[in-house]
Image (cartoon, helix red, strand yellow):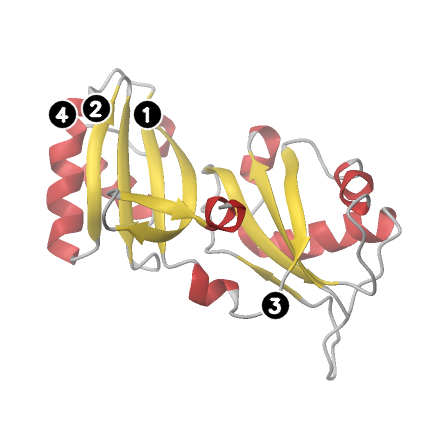
Amino acid sequence: MPRVRIFFSKGGRALFIPHVDLPILFARAARRAGLGMEYTQGFSPHPKTEFGPPLPVGVAGANEPAEFWLTEWRGELLGRWAGVMPDGFAMICAREVSGRSLSKLCRDASYAIRFRNGTSPCAAAPILEREFASLGSLMSIGTDGDAVNISVTDLERSGASKMVKALTAAGLASGWPDVVIQRTAVGRMDEAGGHVISLKEKESQ
């Protein structure tokens, strides 16, 4: 059966859908679009899927990867699938793949952090730099206009929740309501370029 990797964005109303619900949501949409899915074996079979690193509720994703094992795949099926997805999700592209799993390919990530409370990115960047450097997970950080752009590894310990906690502890935010975070790339760090090459970008090279 084809193993199909898709890339999607998540924003708007979809920000409030937990990561744990995404496999069921995508599978239901696939069935509505007429796509057949492979199921796991065992006492409680469920559609065979794999998603990239979890996003906390409230964090947007620009190029999020996921994989599905389907009974068949043709490129034109993506548009049909996209047409039945809930508001806030956009299907970007898809292709049949083989080889290593997403968990092996998605080691690093980049985020853009903005503030609703007027906090300056130049004030926030040193706080985040110290926090993630102390964890040994900081790969790069800088500011660009109204955003802090940060790239990290060890995503289980160094995700968006950790960023909000560090900013709150420093008095730069009162919590999630003051912070807008988007994950802009998931993939592997390009040591020479100093940024994360997203899995989507790497596959298009």
Q: Are marks 1 and 2 in contact (CB under 8 Å)?
A: yes
Q: Give percent across and percent down for residue 157.
A: 29, 58
In the rendered view, does 74 fall on the left or right side of 198? right
Give the alpha-carbon distance from disc 4 to disc 2, as whole Å.
5 Å
Q: Nearer the viewer, mark 3 or mark 4?
A: 3
Looking at numbered disc 4 in the image, what kind of residue is underneath it? Ala
Q: Residues within 10 Å of mark 1 (few under 14, many from 20)?
A: many
Residue 12 lies in quadrant: top right
User: Sequence-wise, which precedes: disc 3 or disc 2?
Assistant: 3
Q: Give percent across and percent down for residue 15.
A: 54, 36
The local secondary structure at tag 4 comes to helix
Q: Which residue is mark 2?
A: 121
Q: Residues within 10 Å of mark 2 (few under 14, many from 20)?
A: some
Q: Nearer the viewer, mark 3 or mark 2?
A: 3
Residue 11 lies in quadrant: top right
Q: Which residue is mark 4?
A: 123
User: Sequence-wise, which precedes: disc 3 or disc 4?
Assistant: 3
Residue 88 against residue 136 in the figure, above or below: above
Looking at numbered disc 2 in the image, what kind of residue is underneath it? Pro
Q: Residues within 10 Å of mark 4 (few under 14, many from 20)?
A: few
